[in-house]
Image (cartoon, rainbow, N blue to C red):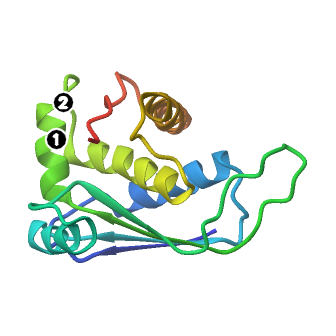
Amino acid sequence: MSIDVNNESGTEVDEQAILDIARYALARMRIHPLSELSVIVVDAEAMEQLHIQWMDLPGPTDVMSFPMDELRPPSKDDDEPPQGLLGDIVLCPEVAERQGKEAATQHSMDEELQLLTVHGVLHLLGYDHEEADEKAEMFGLQAAIVDGWRAEKGMTGPSPAPTVS
């Protein structure tokens, strides 16, 4: 799996954790091991510009996903997953820090960025949360991936509650 993490935000973030949880999420979703993903960490100003340009919405957001090859997880365990470019995930640590503090289970900016990385991966794989049933599926899968990764890393305590809108 080729995953690039590029921090352009000027904020110190745990890039290794972002890389690790992205790799874990893609493996868990059975994405081809030769697929490629890019994660870019930007400041609030850059995220606001992207948010306006692509969503026509004001202000910075927490995460945006830009799919390339529209890869999907294989439908059966024995299906060979396709290989390709997943796309880009853009994260904003300033928004992540605020959301972590405001969450029901308060958590750090880095924990929020990990959650947002998984959220972005799922969006790249075609998951959405516009409808109630889609939201239940996506957020359930997101929690399972974050919890599985945290358990594998020996992390204790409650997992971050979804704060993604």
Residue 8: quadrant of the picture: bottom left
Across and down, in percent, residue 33 comes to 71, 65
Rounded to the nearest whole Å, what is the CA distance between mark 2 and mark 1?
A: 6 Å
Residue 139: quadrant of the picture: top left
Across and down, in percent, residue 45 comes to 9, 72
**Residue appearing at x 51%, y 60% in the figure:** 124
Q: Name the residue type under label 2.
A: Ala
**Residue appearing at x 22%, y 73% in the figure:** 50
- Please tell me how crowded label 2 is: few (under 14), some (14-19), or many (20+) other residues with Cα within 10 Å: some
Q: Quadrant of the N terminus?
A: bottom right
What secondary structure is found at the residue carrying circle 1?
helix
Label 2 sits on residue = 103
Proximity of marks 2 and 1: CB atoms separated by less than 8 Å: yes
- Please tell me how crowded label 1 is: few (under 14), some (14-19), or many (20+) other residues with Cα within 10 Å: many
Q: Quadrant of the C terminus?
A: top left
- In this rendering, position of residue 77 left or right of residue 57: right
**Residue appearing at x 56%, y 36% in the figure:** 152
Number of marks in the rendered image: 2
Across and down, in percent, residue 15 comes to 35, 63
Q: Name the residue type under label 1.
A: Gln
Residue 60: quadrant of the picture: bottom left
Front one among 113 and 163: 163
**Residue appearing at x 85%, y 59% in the figure:** 80
Q: What mark, if any, has residue 76 been given in the picture?
A: none
Label 1 sits on residue = 99
Q: Is residue 9 above or below residue 123?
A: below
- In this rendering, position of residue 76 left or right of residue 147: right
Across and down, in percent, residue 117 comes to 40, 53
